[in-house]
Image (spheres, rainbow, N blue to C red):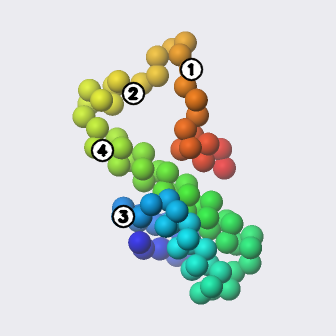
């Protein structure tokens, strides 16, 4: 895992979501002595980056046929995924 500056941009190829959150909390609170608000902001940023990384990896790993099958047809409904939920932040 690597952090770049205060924006908490991360490369999280080998980390699960929970490992990521634990790492952010540990780094922000224990090592830097951040406030609760700063820690929560770091968690939100890390979560957004993690979700983006997962979308990019999924698209890169899918064949063109699989990608076209994922397009939602008009008139169908689909429950929001955790990625869509995180976009709302």
Q: Which mark is residue 70?
A: 2
| Real-space CA distance between mark 4 and mark 3, rounded to the nearest whole angstrom | 16 Å
**Residue at image point 46% right, 22% down:** 72
Quadrant into which the N terminus falls:
bottom left
Q: Position of residue 66 (x, y in %)?
A: 30, 29
Left or right: residue 7 versus residue 41 is left
Left or right: residue 35 versus residue 68 is right
Dot 2: what SS? loop
| Real-space CA distance between mark 2 and mark 4, rounded to the nearest whole angstrom | 14 Å
Q: Position of residue 74 (x, y in %)?
A: 51, 14
| Real-space CA distance between mark 1 and mark 4, rounded to the nearest whole angstrom | 25 Å
Dot 3: what SS? loop
Image vertical order of residue 48 relative to residue 41, above or below = above
| First in residue order: circle 2 vs circle 3 | 3
Quarter of the image for residue 83 reads: top right
**Residue at image point 60% right, 47% down:** 86
User: Dots 2 and 3: beta carbons under 8 Å?
Assistant: no
Q: Position of residue 22 (x, y in %)?
A: 56, 71
Quarter of the image for residue 28 reads: bottom right
Q: Residues within 10 Å of mark 2 (few under 14, many from 20)?
A: few
Residue that numbered label 3 is attached to = 14
Residue that numbered label 4 is attached to = 60
Q: Is residue 13 visible?
A: yes
**Residue at image point 74% right, 73% down:** 36
| First in residue order: circle 4 vs circle 3 | 3
Q: Nearer the viewer, mark 1 or mark 4?
A: 1
Residue that numbered label 1 is attached to = 77
Left or right: residue 38 versus residue 31 is right
Image vertical order of residue 45 relative to residue 80, above or below = below
């Amino acid at each position: 895992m690597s952090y770049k500056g205060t924006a908490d941009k991360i490369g999280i190829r080998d980390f699960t979501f929970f490992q990521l959150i634990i790492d952010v909390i540990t780094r922000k609170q224990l090592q830097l002595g951040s406030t609760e608000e700063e820690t929560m902001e770091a968690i939100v940023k890390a979560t957004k980056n993690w979700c983006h990384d997962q979308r990019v990896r999924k698209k890169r790993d899918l064949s063109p046929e699989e990608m076209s099958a994922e397009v939602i047809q008009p008139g169908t409904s689909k429950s929001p995924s955790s990625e869509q939920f995180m976009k709302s932040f």
